[in-house]
Image (cartoon, rainbow, N blue to C red):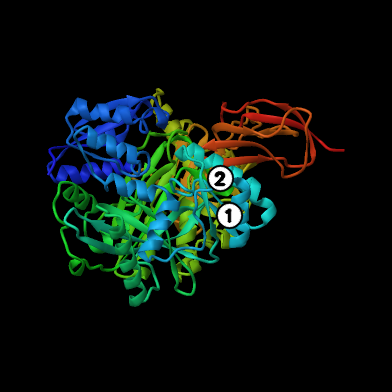
Amino acid sequence: MFAKLLIANRGEIACRVMRTARRLGIRTVAVYSDADAGALHVAMADEAVRIGPAPARDSYLNIDAVIDAVHRTGAEAIHPGYGFLSENAGFAQAVADAGAVFVGPPVAAIRAMGSKSEAKAIMGRAGVPLVPGYHGDDQKDADLRRAADRTGYPALIKAVAGGGGKGMRRVDRAEDFAEALAGARREAKAAFADDRVLIEKYVLQPRHVEVQVFADTQGNAVHLFERDCSIQRRHQKVVEEAPAPGLSAELRGALGAAAVKAAQAIGYVGAGTIEFLLDPSGAFYFMEMNTRLQVEHPVTELITDLDLVEWQLRVAAGQPLPRSQDEILFCGHAIETRLYAEDPARGFLPATGRLAHLRWPEAGPHVRVDTGIRAGDEISVHYDPMIAKLAVWGEDRFAAVRKLRAALSACQIAGLRHNVDFLRAIAFHPAFEAADLDTAFIERHRADLLPAEGAQPLLDAWAIACAELTLYQEQIAREAALKTGDPWSPWSRADGWRLNGEGHGEIRLRSDGTLHKIAVTYKPGGYLFDLPAGRRFVRAQRLANGDVRVDIEGRHAIGTVARVGAQLTVFTADATAQFELVDPLAASAQVDAAPGHLAAPMPGKVIQVAVKPGDDVKRGATLMVLEAMKMEHSIAAPMDGKIERVFFKTGDLVEEGAELLAFVEEG
């Protein structure tokens, strides 16, 4: 085994590898950018080396800087994690040239699978089923269009390099092909420095099922069963589970055998994942191979009770696989959800900001949180917006779903937008409970999963928010009374006492852009709140852990209130609610762009400006394209009109809310 291991990554995967390495007695080396100087993975490591500025291309994607860190620390091996350089054949070769061990497959295997077109050619020769389409070298736009016409619509344009849904576009009509191709090329170029694409038939109502494989240097290869990753947004996985529900023993065996055959066809070594499309008839097709450990590996670890990182390190050290195929069994069911800093209500746009409040469900053998984030940390525009992975295990799928619901209800994140309530909506959806899964799950159930525009928080959240603010004011009053000469005077009481009547007050809260004035009447033992749902008598107390308990006319609820300046986030067992405390003496800020102006919906980089002042535009036309965290977002014309001004050029960085363009409505 190795004495010292360098982890060429960041975030939760770096922390995950460090925990296993520490258990095996291996010293760890972290690398970090300027943005990550105070990150958790840096604090956990035995040594840490700065490798460059915040942008990934200048740090985590800088091969020379990472190799220099190897020389400076004397690390014997490098674990690449996932993302960044993990599937970069040039990096794997540079590691070998530096005299260190790359904890991953051979360079030739990475190269073979790094090109989706070459990978499909190899798999076709090995007898692994393929999706119909075009995987050739001819990249002329017209020839690709003809290939899509032959394949039929809907068709899928997919980047030859990389993965994660980047450089991928579904095309439903021939007339939309040119624009979709241009977008896929741009995104692929930005993410992988390679704008080549392939064309595939878009399989309707497919499931995304992948198989974990492992191989060693002695020629042994096994699979560790399959995972269902069908629930996705923007072609990126959101929920994963193992084993895939509803598969027959025969189909499970066929998938595993095909995956092992695929690994053997390229002389694979280490951990890898063979990804398949499974159509409703039970036919499956090879999509791609990920030559690394996957984000969703915890569900495989939970059902097999194996540490896949330990397997990686042992195989990289030349040891044989710890178990043969017959010795690998699974038990129960595991589900993982990815917690992202993003706004599901606005097309899953990535979010940035400081994690002002963070509380996870109580960890245990059947509840696992993998994260590289702590309360107070920043989610920046430079890297993937994943905050954590939450995985649970149950004796069967029904038990796992119940545990997932409880665990998600215990997650508390405040300070930025996130997808916890969206994940909770998935977990409680009847179709998810019934395992009615395919890659269109989110789109099909969008109305159920995403809050309706203008939806108001539940009664419990309103009551808890008002109780928190009232209790806080009473606390301030008590503290002030203790500083007076007569703290026991009735005039120093903090409960709203008045000599000749009831005490009154007002709380002003803004919810979803609407200002609400909550009248408060102090009553013996509680408060009368004029809430949006009506007048309610509420008893309230602060618990020892800081949570607030309210009794609303005989029914009680408990919630946590995270306060950041004027922003209040209320966490209850049912949902998360956002409020803004409004100072009645201050003018409310106007945050929306003025009519005729378009504002940036997220912080990012301008990668295309499609118009200039004086251009006439039609409603829905693309005016500008922004990129954040390697994902594109198009700014479209909200109506017919004429462009008056363009405030940014290609390459400029913009903040959320920045005015991008001004136009005049036609007519």
What's the residue type where badge 2 is placed? Ala
The number of discs equals 2
**Quadrant housing the N terminus:** top left
At horizontal 31% and vertical 67% (from top left) the residue drawn is: 256
At horizontal 29% and vertical 63% (from top left) the residue drawn is: 260
At horizontal 35% and vertical 39% (from top left) the residue drawn is: 85
604 left or right of 64?
A: right
Q: Nearer the viewer, residue 614 or 552?
A: 614
Q: Nearer the viewer, residue 191 or 39?
A: 191
Q: Of the two numbered discs 2 and 1 on the same chain, state the one appearing first in sequence.
A: 1
664 left or right of 339?
A: right
Q: Is residue 249 above or below residue 402?
A: below
What's the residue type where badge 1 is placed? Arg
501 left or right of 406?
A: right
Query: x, y percentage for residue 630?
Result: 49, 39
Q: Is residue 633 above or below residue 230?
A: above
| Residue 36 seen anywhere in this rendered image of the structure | yes
Which numbered marker is on residue 170? Answer: 1
User: For mark 2, does the 10 Å Cα neighbourhood hold few (<14), some (14 to 19), or many (20 or more) residues?
Assistant: many
Residue wearing tag 2: 184
Q: Nearer the viewer, residue 135 or 72?
A: 135
